[in-house]
């Protein structure tokens, strides 16, 4: 019994290490200064979507182009939206600006099985899943 109790902290440490990322980030974002002074855009242009085109927009603009997120988490000063691709998840982080409006300030992507993913490729997967090809 004593061996099991001693092993619990070691197992917890190993579990946390397995969940940790390698410190690399594949995301794109705005600086705090850019976000604070920006007037959030009410729509995203009609051209091709890129991770950069998702920055500085209000939540309604994003949902107008990508639909409802698969998952949404709200916090007092922020929201995180997750969109599911075929083998990745695209995350869009919204923070309040100085005017009090939410604006997207960071876009990142993670592989379904863990690790960073290319945000542009993941955005393509999300768009393809939203609009499956018609045969």
Image (spheres, rainbow, N blue to C red):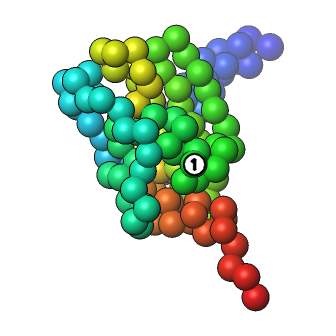
Q: Residue 10 appears in which quarter of the rendering? A: top right
Specify the farthest residue to the bottom: 135
Residue drawn 64% across the image and 50% down it = 67
The answer to whether residue 20 of the structure is visible from this angle is: no
Residue that carries the numbered disc 1 in the rendered image: 64
Specify the farthest residue to the right: 1
Q: Is residue 44 above or below residue 95?
A: below
SS for callout 1: helix
Is the C terminus in the top left, top right, bottom left or bottom right quadrant? bottom right
Residue drawn 68% across the image and 79% down it = 133
Q: How many marks?
A: 1
Q: Residue 21 appears in which quarter of the rendering? A: top left
Q: Position of residue 101 (x, y in %)?
A: 42, 21
Residue drawn 34% across the image and 15% down it = 99
Relative to residue 71, is residue 115 drawn left or right?
left
| 124 or 89, nearer to the observer | 124
Residue drawn 52% across the image and 35% down it = 59
Q: Position of residue 61 (x, y in %)?
A: 50, 43
Q: Position of residue 14 (x, y in %)?
A: 55, 32
Relative to residue 131, is residue 124 drawn left or right?
left
| 93 or 46, nearer to the observer | 46
Neighbour class for label 1 at 10 Å: few (<14), some, many (≥20)? few
| 86 or 96, nearer to the observer | 96
The answer to whether residue 75 of the structure is visible from this angle is: yes
């Amino acid at each position: 019994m004593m061996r099991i109790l001693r092993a619990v902290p070691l197992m917890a440490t190993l579990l946390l290490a397995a969940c940790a990322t390698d410190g690399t980030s594949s995301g794109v974002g705005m600086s705090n200064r850019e976000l604070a002074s920006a007037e959030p855009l009410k729509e995203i242009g009609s051209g091709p979507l890129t991770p950069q085109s998702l920055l500085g927009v209000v939540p309604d603009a994003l949902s107008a182009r990508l639909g409802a997120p698969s998952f949404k988490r709200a916090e007092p000063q922020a929201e995180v939206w997750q969109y599911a691709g075929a083998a990745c998840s695209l995350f869009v982080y919204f923070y309040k600006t100085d005017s009090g409006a939410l604006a997207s300030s960071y876009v990142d992507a993670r592989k379904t099985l863990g690790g960073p993913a290319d945000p542009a490729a993941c955005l393509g997967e999300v768009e393809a899943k939203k609009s499956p090809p018609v045969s």
